[in-house]
Image (tube, rainbow, N blue to C red):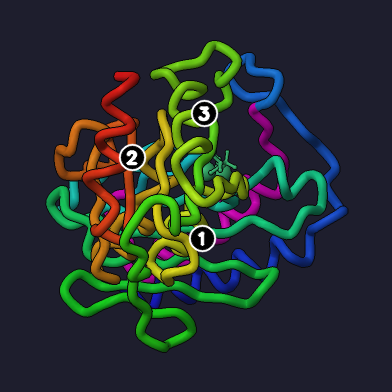
Amino acid sequence: MIKVAMDAALEAGKFLKYSVGKVKSIERKMGQATNLVTEIDKQSEALIIKKIKQHFPAHDILAEESGSHNIKSEFRWVIDPLDGTTNFTHALPIFSVSIAVEHNGEIVAGAIYDPSSDEMFSAEKGSGAFLNGKRIRVSTSQTLIESLLVTGFPYNVKENPNHAVEHFVNFLMEGQGVRRLGSAALDLAYIAAGRLDGFWEVFLNPWDKAAGILLVQEAGGSVTDFRGKPASIYEPNTLATNGTIHEHMLEILRRSL
Ligand code: IPD
Ligand code: CA
Ligand code: CA
């Protein structure tokens, strides 16, 4: 399954890279002016699903643009065909493809591919996390002031859901710096690779984070909700860190729950 996930992510990622600057149609999703979807998101998803169905026709699928394809299998593929659509429509080369496999509710394999840097992040449950085949581990930062943090904002951020704005200000005041890259899957992959130390975001969807959560866990990090409960891809709030700074970040999140 990991091989199929990686092959599909690679193929879709190459298609995305080739399609930069060639978008023909931009639609708004769910009546939100900033929530974009292009024909490239949909074509990327179709390509991924076709590949999975060739190898595992009896598996279920949960994909961002076409929803659930349920056959009542123990296995479910969770797919974001283009994570970072806003960046993509601006030809800003920070976007990715994220594909994960869930087995009886547990994520067992995940691949995130960044076509701009040709980086493939992959993990299988119990076998560690890898970047282009080499083992990766979370950072060793001990304190928040030496930690580079990253976050993202949901499309309804102007309504300040779940105190998104307060959390942002609080971390800006406590960390070394805060980044907003625009692809939650890559944010998580970078925590796994030790490039960034802590990530939080309100209101993520399962496809944004399924592969990324497994990567962080397999790289030795911690992932919970904002109260410290173990991560679930179906819970909106996500905190992922190198482990060492987790408690301090939870303390700051608790100031505005
Ligand atoms: C979005 C990106 C972004 C995050 C948003 C997501 P999309 O996914 O991951 O970084 O802040 O919450 O919805 O819409 O580009 O697939
Ligand atoms: Ca996404
Ligand atoms: Ca997407």
Asked if residue 45 lies left or right of residue 124, the reply is right
Q: Quadrant of ligand 3?
A: top right
| x 64%, y 28%: residue | 35
The residue wearing badge 3 is: 169
The residue wearing badge 1 is: 48
Q: CA distance from mark 3 to mark 2?
A: 17 Å
Q: Quadrant of the N terminus?
A: bottom left
On screen, 23 above or below 124? above
Tally the numbered discs.
3
For marks 1 and 2 on the same chain, the one whose residue lies earlier in the sequence: 1
Q: What amino acid is labelled 2 in the image?
A: Thr
Q: CA distance from mark 1 to mark 2?
A: 26 Å
Measured as percent of width and height from the top left, residue 105 is found at 16, 48
Magenta segment includes 49: yes
Give the structural element (helix, strand or loop) at label 1.
helix
Nearest-to-viewer mark from 1 and 2: 2
Measured as percent of width and height from the top left, residue 48 is found at 51, 60
Name the residue nearer the viewer: 236 or 60.
236
Q: Is residue 119 visible?
A: yes
Pointer 2 residue Cβ closer than 8 Å to ligand 1: no
Name the residue nearer the viewer: 253 or 56.
253
